[in-house]
Image (spheres, rainbow, N blue to C red):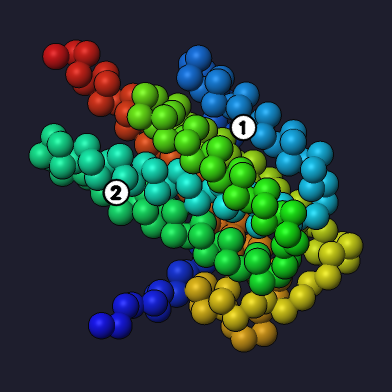
Amino acid sequence: MKLQTQIEPRPVRDDLPLDVHVKPKTVSDKVAFAFVRFLRFFADKFFAKRYGHRAVVLETVAAVPGMVGGLWQHLTALRKMRDDEGWIRTLLDEAENERMHLMTFIEIAQPNWFERLLIAVVQLMFYNAYFFLYLFAPRTAHRVVGYFEEEAVISYTQYLEEIDSGRHENVAAPQIAIDYWGLPKTATLRDVVIAVRADEAEHRDVNHFFVDEIDRKRGEFQEK
């Protein structure tokens, strides 16, 4: 038996705005935003302008929520014997997309042993924290991801500025990125960052949309 390993090329979206920010309104929003800003503070202090290495560690974290959310939506759909309305596939696709970001930046940044250890520790801590957050407060969990992706768009924009200014070498794109996004053979790191940033903007909008859907369904339930 041969397992399928080929992935259809993912088109790079260029129709999503980059400066989107959902202002925190509820207590849930404010908690989610404060948590993400807390993580951003430490990422900035630890990695500074080493954006390639930052991407390796943070994409490991970013690949967790989609898998956790997809699992819970799957179990919920089974338990309640209802249609998932496309949430499962969307969340699992998000997890796979973030994993491909990680595979790409491993080729570019070549993480050292300490960063690999950090990845293992951070993933262990974040997976368990997000698992229970999604179990008890899925709305907050999706808002966390929405804000996390907002910060990711900002970080990749700054990464792009470093490349354009010549402060970061615009190396050739790794083959895995060329195959995944269907980039030309002459593609460079700049093209990869643009593609990844577009993906993060899409995840941002999807997770904020999920929050709106949860609010809508709760409102309908309360009206009954």
Q: Looking at the rendering, in which quadrant would you find the N terminus?
A: bottom left
Residue 15 visible, this angle: no
Q: Secondary structure at mark 2?
A: helix
- Circle 1: element type: helix
Whether residue 96 sits left or right of residue 50 in the image: it is left
Task: Please report the residue visible at 67 percent of the width from the left and 76 percent of the height from the top.
Answer: 173
**Residue pointed to by mark 1:** 36
Q: Which residue is mark 2?
A: 88
Q: What residue is at 25 percent from the left and 26 percent from the top?
A: 217
Task: Point out residue 2 in the picture as x, y percentages from the top left corner.
Answer: 30, 83
- Give the mark, 2 or 1, whose residue is nearer the N terminus: 1
Q: CA gap, disc 2 to disc 1?
A: 24 Å
What amino acid is labelled 2 in the image? Answer: Ile
- Check disc 1 and give the amino acid type: Val
Q: Position of residue 106 (x, y in %)?
A: 65, 66
Left/right of residue 199 with respect to residue 162 in the rendered view:
left
